[in-house]
Amino acid sequence: GVRVIVAARGAARAASLAGRFAGLVQVSPTVAEAVRDADVVVNATPIGLTGDQLPVPVEFLRRDAAVMDLAYRQGETPWVRAARARGHRAGDGLEMLIAQGAHAFERWFGRTPDLQVMRAALAA
């Protein structure tokens, strides 16, 4: 029952991605159309790493949609802040970065890292 809808700046890139997951991924011609009925909207672009641009205007989102920005920066991305201000559940890629780092640490050193230390190091 899951549908994945992709919107991209380049139609060829979106079609290529959809082709890798035939039958699971659909390409949308516009961002507005892609997110209109979405339960979860994920930004996988670098928009938000610098400046105040939003990858998707929060007004395009359903009121109950959750937002995940794979980008992260100190104080969260503008999109995450804007989505939260509008009442959306929202998070950035910081926890994903920590989880990836923890997994790599375990593989390299054979023990589980202290996640609080990792969070503190990223905050510093």
Image (spheres, rainbow, N blue to C red):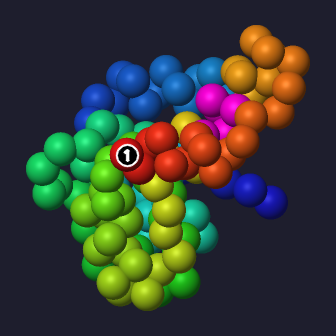
Q: Amino acid at mark 1?
A: Ala
Residue 11 lies in quadrant? top left
Q: Residue at x 29, y 29 (%)?
A: 10
Residue 57 drawn above or below residue 2 = below
Q: Is residue 63 visible?
A: yes
Q: Chief secondary structure of the magenta span? A: helix
Identify which residue, 52 or 25, lies in the foreground.
52
> Looking at the image, is 20 positioned above or below residue 89?
above
Across and down, in percent, residue 106 comes to 80, 23
In the rendered view, tell whether residue 82 sits above or below residue 73: below
Q: Which residues are magenta?
A: 98-102
Q: Is residue 33 visible?
A: no
Residue 37 lies, in percent from the top left, at: 52, 72
Name the residue located 59 percent from the left edge and 24 percent from the top edge. 19
The residue at the far top in this view is 108
Which quadrant of the view contains residue 87?
bottom left
**Residue at x 26% of width, y 43% of height:** 49
Q: Position of residue 121 (x, y in %)?
A: 48, 41
Q: Identify the residue position indicated by label 1 in the image.
A: 124
Quadrant in the picture for the N terminus:
bottom right
